[in-house]
Amino acid sequence: MPKHGKKYRKAAEGLELTARFAVEEAMAKVVDSAFAKFDETVDVAINLGVDPKYSDQMVRGACSLPHGLGKDVRVAVFCKGEKQAEAREAGAEIVGAEDLVAEVKAGNLNFDKAVATPDVMALVGQIGRVLGPRGLMPNAKTGTVTFDVANAVKEMKAGRVEFKVDKAGVLHAPIGKVSFGAEKLMDNLKTVLENVNRLKPSSAKGAYMKALSLSSTMGPGYKVDPTLIRKFIEG
């Protein structure tokens, strides 16, 4: 039984595993090789020269993409009082405090992103085991624990992406849809790379961005020549 379907094998035909491309070339190949009937998401995977088991080498952050993510984002805000009206006015679909926590405990997680004000984090902590594994737990480091809920909601609606290096030292992030075209996707990619580069731990030694790969949801991955990553960021 083949590991991949016919369309994937056709898209990857002639692609050598050792091949490395310039960013522009890799992005063009990702867009051209997309074959799904839906608008595929384009992702970047970066192998970082860090050891995440040490807290001072954990790379985690968030940034707003210039061209957004191309998807509707449902935002839930955990807050009280006047902040609830502020969150709704900014476009949050779900707003609440104790009642929202109870909904989540009951298994209702009909939202994609979550924001919380600092004064309700003790409440939100009760559902940390539910939100955490799904990447929904509000965190001050990514700007999702804040009293400025209006700005946080608007950023998420506009295309805010959060990223965190995994145990293997690899960071994954979506950068938009295939329909954006290569130029807009490269703008989004550059924003992500600039932010990841800015967060380089002072304790990290040697090469920081050791490898980078671009791919669409269903398509093959195209590896970027690591010697060209810095040139792309600075260019």
Image (spheres, rainbow, N blue to C red):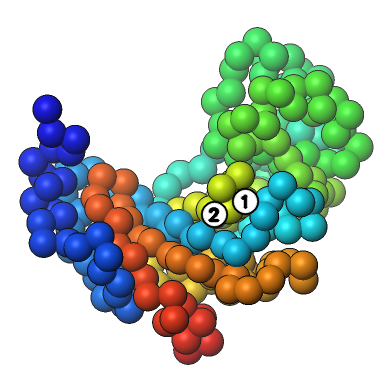
Residue at the location (60% across, 70% down)?
Answer: 208
Q: Amino acid at mark 2?
A: Leu
The quarter of the picture where residue 12 lies is bottom left
Extreme residue toward the top, this view: 106
Which comes sooner in the sequence, label 1 or label 2?
Answer: 1
Q: Residues within 10 Å of mark 2 (few under 14, many from 20)?
A: some
Q: Secondary structure at mark 1?
A: strand
State the image coordinates of residue 49 (x, y, percent, origin top left): 60, 64
Q: Which residue is mark 2?
A: 171
State the image coordinates of residue 174 (x, y, percent, origin top left): 45, 53
**Most foreground residue, 183 or 95:** 183
Q: Secondary structure at mark 2?
A: strand
Q: Amino acid at mark 1?
A: Lys
State the image coordinates of residue 127 (x, y, percent, origin top left): 74, 22
Residue 20's place in the image compared with 214, above or below, is below
As drawn, is 125 to the left or to the right of 231?
Answer: right
**Most foreground residue, 76 or 52:** 52
| Mark linked to residue 164 | 1
